[in-house]
Image: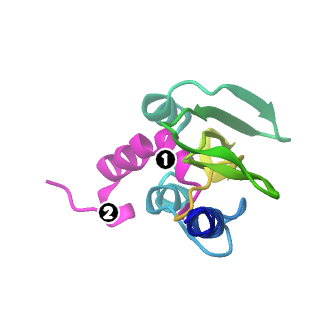
Amino acid sequence: MRKLVLLVLLAGSSILSSSCVAPDDTSDISKEDATTAAARKEMVGLSEADVRMCAGFPTATADAGGSAQIWTYQRTVQRGNLNVVIPTLAVGAIPTVGGSLNVNPGGYCNTQIRMVDGRVAEVAYAGDNNLPNHRDALCVSTVDACVAYARQRHPARTGASSR
């Protein structure tokens, strides 16, 4: 009976550890989040005042030569975690059996907006901002209001219908 319990524990821990591991970099297997992808296109052309209205004031700015600036919005995302801990057991010749599982760790996003002559020319993302299913998903909170703002202000350009 003890051997059966030990085998079940070993099998369960190996299945748990092998099936619940997600790669650190999911960029090759996941798609870009729809909102962050839309922001790359639909925010282009917004004025500095428009961006301040929808995203707030940038965390940092840097000169990019000539009349260009790069505005950075830094966001740290604290998400709820699910931690499952399997108790460590010492049984016979096998010193320990156990482990843990952590789902949805936190991350951060730096959204960079390049302004040229007072207008958005480019939007890019950097940081630990991927989720298992979507790239740049932790950046949505920075740009989602700007995508809606751009669609409201320029419905013909973005393809959105006005109501």
Mark toward the start of the polypeptide (2 vs 1): 1
Q: Residues within 10 Å of mark 1 (few under 14, many from 20)?
A: many
- Is residue 32 highlighted in magenta? no
Residue 83: image quadrant is top right
Residue 21, visible in the rendered structure: no
Dominant secondary structure (helix, strand or loop) of the stretch shown in magenta: helix
Image color mode? rainbow
Q: Secondary structure at mark 1?
A: helix
What residue is disc 2 on?
A: 156
The image quadrant where one finds the N terminus is: bottom right
Q: Nearer the viewer, mark 2 or mark 1?
A: 1
> What is the span of residues highlighted in magenta in the rendered image?
134-163
Amino acid on which the number 2 mark rests in the picture: Ala
Question: How far apart are labels 2 and 1 at the CA level?
Answer: 23 Å
Q: Residue at x 67, y 42 (%)?
A: 117
Name of the residue lying farthest toward the front:
1
- Is residue 152 highlighted in magenta? yes
Q: Residue at x 50, y 55 (%)?
A: 39
How far from the left and from the top, in percent, is residue 52?
Answer: 50, 29
State the mark number for residue 140.
Answer: 1
Amino acid on which the number 1 mark rests in the picture: Val
Name of the residue lying farthest toward the bottom:
29
Residue 92: image quadrant is bottom right
* 37 relative position to 87: left or right: left
Q: Residue at x 68, y 75 (%)?
A: 28
Is 21 located above or below residue 149 in the figure?
below
Front-most of 16 and 22? 16
How far from the left and from the top, in percent, is residue 76?
Answer: 61, 32
